[in-house]
Image (spheres, rainbow, N blue to C red):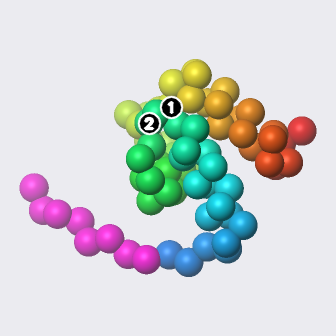
Amino acid sequence: MKKETMREVKIQPACYAAIEKIVSHSQRFGSVDEYVNFVLAELLFGADHDRMTDDEQRGVEQRLKELGYLS
């Protein structure tokens, strides 16, 4: 299998910090890069094989509420 080349993407510091907090509470994602790649795949391709568990989804939603992104 051919190894994919990774590319860099710049994001705002506040977004990075928010993602770091989500990752720190996750058992699924080991880094910001893993989380960002998962979210982008979901948005772009609807990647069913990488779905979060219900507990992980609730954890992300709770953290986003704590950060003020969800009401």
Q: Quadrant of residue 25?
A: top right
Dividing the image into 4 quarters, which one contains the C terminus? top right
State the image coordinates of residue 46 (x, y, percent, origin top left).
50, 43
Question: Mark 2 to mark 1: distance in Å?
Answer: 8 Å
56 relative to 25, above or below: above
Residue at the spot of label 2? 28
16 relative to 21, above or below: below
Number of marks in the image? 2
State yes or no: residue 5 in magenta: yes
In this orientation, which residue lies closer to the viewer: 25 or 57? 25
State the image coordinates of residue 21 (x, y, percent, origin top left).
63, 49
State yes or no: residue 59 in magenta: no
At horizontal 38% and vertical 75% (from top left) the residue drawn is 7
Dividing the image into 4 quarters, which one contains the N terminus? bottom left
Residue at the spot of label 1? 52
Q: Residue furthest right?
A: 71
Q: In screen coordinates, is 4 left or right of 34?
A: left
Q: What segment carries the magenta color?
A: 1-8
Q: Secondary structure at mark 2?
A: loop
Q: Secondary structure at mark 1?
A: loop
Circles 2 and 1: CB atoms closer than 8 Å: yes
Q: Earlier in the sequence, mark 2 or mark 1?
A: 2
Disc 2 marks a residue whose amino acid type is Arg
Q: Residue furthest top?
A: 54
29 relative to 18, above or below: above
Numbered label attached to residue 61: none
At horizontal 49% and vertical 57% (from top left) the residue drawn is 32
Work out whether residue 41 can be spotted. no
